[in-house]
């Protein structure tokens, strides 16, 4: 479904990725692990089209996303791709339901239809009672559940989760991820998950280990 070949990315004179190859199959959960600063988040952002790779190709369903414009890649993240960040990045002025409905509204859905879908997704993550609450009135775990609902509300084909539990304690982190994994298994989405935590990487079908911007040939990740 998603293939990256020879991906390189530098920030100024500092290389972040040094020719990384990665494949993600349909419905597969792949964890990208490795020490801090090894290029995990940069790889995820390149695969999701948030960053443009300096060299290499990123192919999604036979189309090379590195050739697409930023606007086209942005549209893809409103339809086929969903993104979940470490701190959720909910819009503080909007309620939980409004935050979750936002991707649907941007894609052209009507307000009533979008809200109904948003509340349904909040319910799947156990936070439907927070539909009319703003982020400031929620705990960190509740905010991340809302963010997960927002990432999945368009039923994307690929979910990109960048340290999605990094701002949570272990119990809340595992609860949020377990709920997300259950949902993506049900709808057959693929997941690219960046983490440095062994219990979180254990939810994946397969682990990709990075060190110094390249694949670690030893394959010894955080769970080893």
Image (cartoon, rainbow, N blue to C red):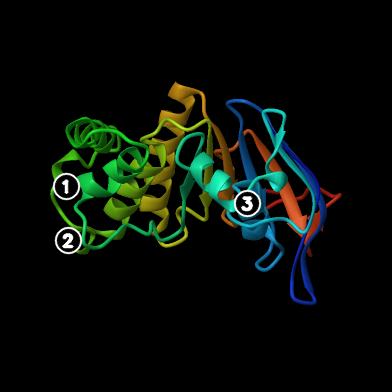
Give the image location of residue 70, x and y in percent. 58, 52
Of residue 52 and residue 180, the one placed in the foreground of this image is 52
Label 2: which secondary element? helix
User: Decide: marks 2, 1 in contact (CB < 8 A)?
Assistant: yes
Q: Nearer the viewer, residue 126 or 116?
A: 116
Q: Which residue is mark 3?
A: 44
Number of the label disc, if any, that sits on residue 130:
1
Q: Identify the image quadrant of the N terminus.
A: top right
Q: CA distance from mark 2 to mark 1?
A: 9 Å
Q: Residue at x 48, y 26 (%)?
A: 185
Measure the C-alpha gap from mark 1 to mark 3.
Answer: 30 Å
* Residue depicted at x 34% and y 41%: 149
Identify the residue at horizontal 21%, vertical 62% (top origin).
93
Q: Earlier in the sequence, mark 2 or mark 1?
A: 1
In the visual, does 142 lie left or right of 107? Answer: left
**Residue 137 — which label?**
2
Q: Is residue 81 left or right of residue 112?
A: right
Within 10 Å of disc 3 (Cα), the crowding (few <14, some 14-19, many 20+) is: many
Q: Nearer the viewer, mark 2 or mark 3?
A: 3
Look at the numbered discs 1 and 3 and tell me whether their residues touch, using CB distance below 8 Å: no
Label 1 environment density (alpha carbons within 10 Å; few <14, some 14–19, many ≥20): many
Q: Quadrant of residue 170?
A: bottom left
Tag 3 secondary structure: helix
Secondary structure type for disc 1: helix
């Amino acid at each position: 479904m998603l293939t990256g070949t020879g991906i390189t990315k530098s920030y100024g004179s500092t290389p972040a990725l040094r020719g990384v190859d990665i494949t993600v199959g349909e419905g597969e959960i792949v964890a990208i692990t490795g020490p801090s600063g090894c290029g995990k988040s940069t790889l995820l952002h390149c695969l999701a089209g948030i960053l443009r790779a300096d060299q290499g190709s990123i192919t999604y369903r036979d189309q090379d996303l590195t050739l697409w414009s930023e606007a086209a890649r942005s549209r893809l993240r409103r339809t086929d791709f969903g993104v979940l960040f470490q701190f959720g990045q909910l819009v503080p002025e909007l309620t939980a339901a409004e935050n979750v409905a936002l991707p649907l509204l941007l894609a052209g859905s009507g307000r009533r239809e979008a809200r109904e879908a948003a509340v349904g997704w909040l319910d799947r993550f156990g936070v439907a009672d927070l539909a009319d609450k703003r982020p400031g009135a929620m705990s960190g775990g509740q905010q991340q559940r809302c963010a997960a609902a927002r990432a999945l509300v368009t039923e994307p084909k690929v979910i990109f989760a960048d340290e999605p539990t990094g701002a949570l304690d272990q119990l809340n982190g595992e609860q949020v991820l377990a709920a997300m994994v259950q949902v993506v298994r049900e709808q057959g989405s693929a997941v690219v998950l960046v983490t440095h935590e062994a219990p979180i990487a254990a939810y994946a079908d397969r682990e990709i280990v990075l060190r110094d911007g390249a694949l670690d040939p030893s394959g010894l990740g955080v769970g080893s």
